[in-house]
Image (spheres, grey):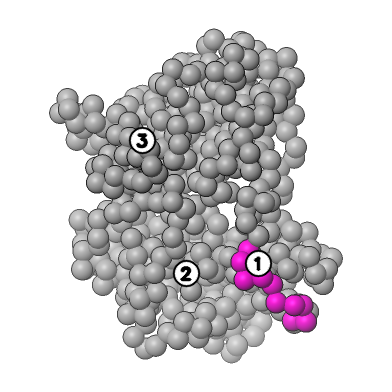
Amino acid sequence: MSNQSLGNRVQAELEQAVKSGLLPDSIQPKAEQLLSRLMKPVRLALLGMPGSGKSTLLNLLVGDEVIPDGIRLPTLQLAYGQSEKAVCTLSDGSKTVLDGVDMTEIADLSPVFVEMLLPLPALRKISLLEVVAPNDANAIHRASQWAAKRSDVTLWSTRGFNETEQRIWSTMPDLTKDHAFCMITRADFLKTEGMLETTVGAVKLAAKDEFAEVLAIATTQAVNARRADGTVDKVAMRDSGGSALISAVLKQVELGRQSAVDMADVMLHQYNDILANEPAPATKATPVEDIAPAPETPEEASEDIAIEDDAPAAPPQMEEPPAPAEPEEVTDAKPAAQDAISRLREIAARKNVSRDAAAEAQAEAETPSAPEPEMEAEEATPALQPATREAYAHVIAYIEERGTELAAVLEEQGENGPAEVMTLTADHIQWLCDYLNENGDDADQSLQRARDTAFDAADMVQLMQMEKRDDVALEAVSLMLQIKRELQADIAA
C-alpha cells in the first residue's frame, strides 16, 4: 500500500470515528485535532531579501501566474478556495473583501496584508505565505521569525546568501532549518556569466547544516516550461532546476503528513474494538477542498508584519484566532507502543513480506503516489546508482525484520517491554547510520540526505532515552519508520 493510499484510508477511518461519537471523552478532542491536521494543507513559506525571486517561485509552485511582473504586493497568504476571493487588510486594521482576484485593484488599495483564495489544484496540497519586507535586516529578521511560527516548510530565496542573510537565517528555529531549502535563483544568469558552480559552492559552504538542501533554479525558465495548454516541457523544467524543487517540496509535504497518519493509525488500532460495529467508512477521504480551513491572519503581537517601503510605515494590529493545539500523544503509553509494533506486524502481513523482504520493499516503492498535475515533477531526480539502490533495499528489509522482533520483545517482556524496545530501537538506528555511512555510491545526492536523516534520528533517540516516559518507544519506532519511508521514496523516484 502506498503512503498516499494509507493516508487516505487512515483519514477516512478517523473521520468516521470522530463522527461516530463512540470514542472516549478523553480521546475525542485528540482525534478531532489529528483529523484537522490531516485535512489541512502543508504550510509553505517563501522568505528572502527583496528582489530575490520569491514571487516567481510562488508562481512556479502553484502552476499559474498569480503575481504578474511589475505588481508590488505586501505579505501574501495563498490558500485553496472554490472561487477566487481576496481579503485585504488595510493600514487602519479594516478589511476589504474582493470577489475575484484583480492584482491591480488589490495593489491600488495599498494593503498591508492579503489573504487570497484560488481554485488551483496545487493549493489542495500546500498553502503559501510569501513574506515581503523592506530592505532592512531587522525588518526581515522580524518578518522571518513571524513566518517561522506559521509554516511547515520554508524556502529561502537568494542570489548568493550574503553575510546579512546568513545572520538573519542563523537565528531561525532549528525545526524550521530542518525543513528548509536555500534556493539560489537566477541560475540561468549565473551560468551565462560562468559563475554558477562558484556561487553554488560558496552558498553550500556558507549554508552548511543550515538547510535541508541547497538548490539552484532558473526561475523564469522553470515558469516558462509550463505551456499555455497545461502541459510541461519536461526537459526545460528539469534543466531549470524546477523539477528538483517541486520534487523536494512534495517529499516534505508527504513527510509532514505522515507523522499525523502514524499517530492516527495507532489511535484507531487502539480503539478498534469499540469502533468495530460502525459501518465501514467511504473508501475515499473527504476532499481537502471541501474542508480546508480559512488561512490564518497575522497575530496581534509585539512582532510587526514587515511591509514594502511604499506601504504605510506602521503596520496595523491584527487579530488571529488561537492556533489549534498540536495533537497530544495517546495517554496510555504502553498499549500505544505495543500497538505501534503490532501495526508493523500487520502491515508486513498485508504486504505479504517474504524472506526476500528487500525485493518486496523495492516492488512496493516502484508504485509511488501520483502528485497533483500542477505539482508533478517527472524526471526530477537522477536514478540511484546500483550500489545505493542495493544498500537502500537492504536497510528497508532490515527495518521490517526488526519490527517483527520488537513485537516479540513486547509480548515476552510485559511491563519492561517499552523500555527494552527503546533500547533495541536505538541500537537499530545506530546500525542504520553505520551501514549507510559505509555503503552506497557517494555520487548519489540522496545518499547524503539519507545519512543525515539517520544520524539526526540517532541523536534524537539518545535524547529520548533520557526521558522517563514509556511512550518514547512509540516515538523512536516512528523515527525508524520515517527512515524506511524516505528510502522507499528515493528508490521510487
Looking at the rendered structure, the kind of residue marked 3 is: Val
Q: Is residue 441 left or right of residue 248?
A: left
Q: Which residue is mark 2?
A: 2
Residue 450 placed where, x, y %?
35, 59
Closer to us: 6 or 329: 6
Query: For the point 35% across and 70% down, which residue is it?
Result: 366
Query: What secondary structure is found at the residue carrying circle 3?
Result: helix
> Farthest residue in the left direction?
194
Q: Is residue 223 visible?
A: yes
State how far apart marks 2 and 3 are (Cα): 30 Å
Query: Label 3: how many residues lie within 10 Å, few (<14), some (14-19) or many (20+)?
Result: many
Residue 147 lies left or right of residue 230; in this view the side is: right
Residue ID at (32%, 27%): 159
Give the residue type that dot 2 points to. Answer: Ser
Position of residue 327 measured from the top left corner of the image (x, y, whole percent):
69, 56
Q: Where are the magenta residues, as a range?
A: 275-285
Mark 3 lies on residue: 223
Give the residue number, with chain letter if any, for mark 1: 12
Q: Is residue 133 above or below residue 385?
A: above
Q: Amino acid at mark 1?
A: Ala
Q: x and y percent of residue 47 in the render?
A: 47, 31
Residue at x 60% of width, y 20% of height: 106
User: Residues at badges 2 and 3 in contact (C-beta under 8 Å)?
Assistant: no
- Packing grade of label 1 (10 A; few <14, some 14-19, many >=20) is some
Q: Nearer the viewer, residue 149 or 41?
A: 41
Q: Is residue 53 above or below residue 378?
A: above
